Image (spheres, coloured by chain):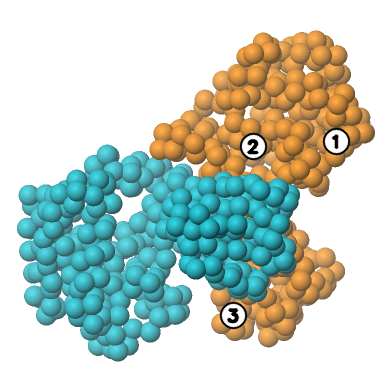
Chain colours: A cyan, B orange
Amino acid sequence: MERFVAETLGIVLSGTRLVVACSGGPDSMALLAMLHALRVRGGFSLVAAHLDHGLRPDAAADQAAVAQLCHHLDIQCISQRMDVAALAAQQRMGLEEAGRLARQEFLARVRSDHGAQWIVTGHQLNDLAEDQLMRQLRGAGWPALGGMAGCDAASGVLRPLLLQPKAALLELASTLRLPFRNDPMNEDPRFFRNRIRNTILPLFLAENPSYLSQVAGLWLLAQLDARHFSMAMDAAPALPDHGGTSLLLPATALRSVDAAIRLRCCKRALERLALGAPQLETLLALEAAFTAGRIGAVFHFPGRVTARVLSQGLHFSAPDAAATSP
Amino acid sequence: MERFVAETLGIVLSGTRLVVACSGGPDSMALLAMLHALRVRGGFSLVAAHLDHGLRPDAAADQAAVAQLCHHLDIQCISQRMDVAALAAQQRMGLEEAGRLARQEFLARVRSDHGAQWIVTGHQLNDLAEDQLMRQLRGAGWPALGGMAGCDAASGVLRPLLLQPKAALLELASTLRLPFRNDPMNEDPRFFRNRIRNTILPLFLAENPSYLSQVAGLWLLAQLDARHFSMAMDAAPALPDHGGTSLLLPATALRSVDAAIRLRCCKRALERLALGAPQLETLLALEAAFTAGRIGAVFHFPGRVTARVLSQGLHFSAPDAAATSP
């Protein structure tokens, strides 16, 4: 874990304060115990944070388990209860999505309140395998298919266990007799992630018992390629910004790079204008239309962003700018 | 199909002769009928080729169905029977592998006998989806994960239906009342491909009914990226060749490119020395060892090829050259 953070992610933890997101499950409890063991040598300090989603009658026991371990390790523990079901109903979203948003907000608040640099989560290699499969099913391109980031400066999230198999964490939690709890909602097949975890991933592991190594390898390759593509895009001239709601990728810049980089320049432009990943298929069609010189062709992306092939290049516009687009 | 061959694959069929690999299944029968319909406009000529693997008592009926369609369409049909089970026993390989080798040899012979440019196969989008999943399970990197080539100049294989869903071909075969046959061995769960086809792929399609579009998109992206990486590798100085069984990638050349390209230069060097895809994990470890300057580190690859980190660069050697390596 120390080598992964320092060498693969290139992050120095010395002198920082970390918020450890702690559900009470084996992964986050093992994470808390490991970070506790390393904190003197690593020169960082810890705060634990637990959110009760208000969805299960035995949630109080999860909170108690986290509090117990924190007390034992002498780590400050911040707990809060939120009504995620009410939030989901109010925002008209699924329970998974509402829970994710509630956690993000809670953890960001604890991070800010305690002047912490990172929110550290217990995501491990099995989670990464599930994430790769979910991205594959939802239509991700490359390197997005490699899976979630090891660290994300924007949200301040750090995932030091990302390449550790779940089995190793369970073993550690058992050996140390950590008071971890298993969430019965992880079995519910109504959730997409649970169907991946409990049905599809076991079939992959049955075909190749060392499939998790492939998951880790693919993730590492995706990191190299993300850096490579990022550099290649930077070599192409930057995007002039017309007031924040529209962008032009000049034809000369687009012609100075090959199709693989051109496609990713379009993806980056779209991500600057709206949240939501552009569909690979539409990106491919846009790139092909530019290359074929189909002036006037229009493509639609998430967030109601449109892309138009013009003689001067590719023009991307978000809804606010639609009225003033050329 | 015409646009895919001409635009995506960039292949001109006019003036060529094509060997159509025809098992008697719906895909290859639809392929034969489609090529027949296009042959005047396309300016190419056809020979059909059918191999009886000698594995099923009703194989004669497959051969008869192919012969019937060829007679109806006035296409010459070359048939042969081979004892694939005996070949598998003799070469100590699985039935799938022995069948694949027997087909390759047979089709290459028909191609050569008839002065044909391409061996055309009925591989379609569902086959490509299965191929992507098998590569994923076996540990492929990117862009190999995108799946089989649309055309392969070395083996002379062309797959014009690669982005056509199987359902469309089945519909065509039914509409035209083609005398196709279904191979009952496609159901046998002892074969890896059948478990992918009949168990894993249906789960993917249940989660995302348009998953096959993602498969096609990923394949197209892989083609762009393969060209991109190939150009980036060519920009790095070429590999000096020491007698064909060993290669040196000079340190100066390796340092002139980033890690993503360095890793693929290693992969290309390995593929020049031996058949068999190098494992992504070992490639990542080799690249990391070079970058960290771990002089003397040795890595082992398929075909008993070894790679050594030397001060002058990375040295790859096949077994024959092992005695003379530095």
| CA gap, disc 2 and disc 1 | 18 Å
Q: Is residue B95 above or below residue B217?
A: above
Is residue A235 rendered to the left or right of residue A56?
Answer: right
Residue A171 position, x and y percent, is 26, 62
Residue where numbered disc 2 is placed: B163
Could you tell which of marks 3 and 1 lies nearer the N-terminus? Answer: 1
Per the rendering, the mark at residue A25 is: none
- Residue B212: which quarter of the image? top right
Q: Which marked residue is nearer to the observer: mark 3 or mark 1?
A: 1
Q: Which marked residue is nearer to the observer: mark 2 or mark 3?
A: 2
Residue B194 position, x and y percent, is 53, 32
Per the rendering, the mark at residue B291 is: 3
Q: Are marks 2 and 3 in contact (CB under 8 Å)?
A: no
The amino acid marked with disc number 2 is Leu
Q: Secondary structure at mark 2?
A: loop
Residue where numbered disc 1 is placed: B13
